[in-house]
Amino acid sequence: MVVDAWQLVKSEKSPTARIFVAVPLPEALCRELSALESRFVLGRPFLRWVRADLMHVTVRFLGSTVLDRVPLVTEATERAVKRAQPHTLHLADLGGFPNAESPRILWVGLQRDAGYRDLAVLFERLNVELTHHGFLEEKHAFTPHITLARVRDDARGNDRRVIGEELATERAFLPDHSDVPVRELIVMRSDLSPSGPTYTPIASATLGS
């Protein structure tokens, strides 16, 4: 448990907080992914890159959550990981959403191997536990990834196509540190501001504990 962070959350006057559950990434991997920014020369003015220390794999995004219910998220997460064993995710190629030709988001996908399947099972367990606590069931398909950058809202269609062309030349890129060990899940708070988001870890749950 990250007790100090939770005390900070409870002490604030706002009745809600944006909450998500995520897999943290190794620092070396985050640095290498962040360095990709230098490879997008033409599209760089139109991209807002995620800071290296904010990169992660989201397992479940709950959004605005009443503060009194945040401990239930922690409890659900701890119950979900009890029967799970540590495993490893492996990065695939780069991609774009909604498509790679005219993207609004750049991301790194994951290989659909045994580690991916283990994470999918963990997602389902977390979904069940959260539902037991009264949270809405996640209806969207589980598509874990690492968000690298978002295209600025004022980018035109041609700007996005330029980014798509650069993305096509880099799609096969894999950093040297391409493994993501899954040893714990972090319950995280997200605060938005004009300068970008800030993430505060509230609790951690170790797999198999």
Image (tube, rainbow, N blue to C red):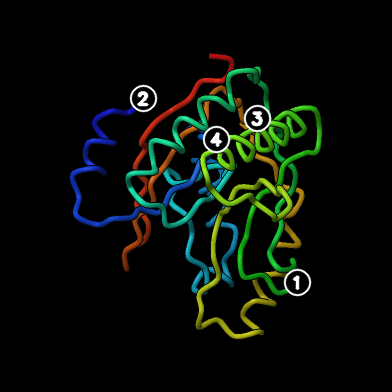
Nearer to us of marks 4 and 2 is 2
Disc 3, SS: strand
- Alpha carbons under labels 1 and 4: distance apart: 28 Å
Label disc, if present, on residue 68 of the rendered structure: none
The answer to which of marks 3 and 2 sits earlier in the sequence is 2
Q: From the top left corner, tell me how far across and down residue 86 is, in percent.
A: 63, 19
Report how many numbered discs are placed on residues in the image.
Answer: 4
| Mark 1: few/some/many CA within 10 Å (<14, 14-19, 20+) | some
Q: Which quadrant holds residue 170?
A: bottom right
- Alpha carbons under labels 4 and 2: distance apart: 15 Å
Q: Is residue 185 left or right of residue 72?
A: right
- Alpha carbons under labels 3 and 1: distance apart: 27 Å
Q: What residue would you read off at disc 2?
A: 1
Disc 1, SS: loop
Label 1 sits on what residue type? Glu
Label 3 sits on what residue type? Asp
Disc 4, SS: strand
Label 4 sits on what residue type? Val
In this orientation, which residue lies closer to the viewer: 193 or 124? 124
What residue sits 58% from the left and 19% below the top?
Answer: 82
The answer to which of marks 3 and 1 sits earlier in the sequence is 1
The answer to which of marks 4 and 2 sits earlier in the sequence is 2
Q: What residue would you read off at disc 1?
A: 101
Label 2 sits on what residue type? Met
The answer to which of marks 3 and 4 sits earlier in the sequence is 4
- Alpha carbons under labels 1 and 2: distance apart: 43 Å
In this orientation, which residue lies closer to the viewer: 112 or 17? 17
Q: What residue would you read off at disc 4?
A: 23
The answer to which of marks 1 and 4 sits earlier in the sequence is 4
Q: From the top left corner, tell me how far across and down residue 188 is, in percent.
A: 42, 42
Q: What residue would you read off at disc 3?
A: 179
- Alpha carbons under labels 3 and 2: distance apart: 25 Å
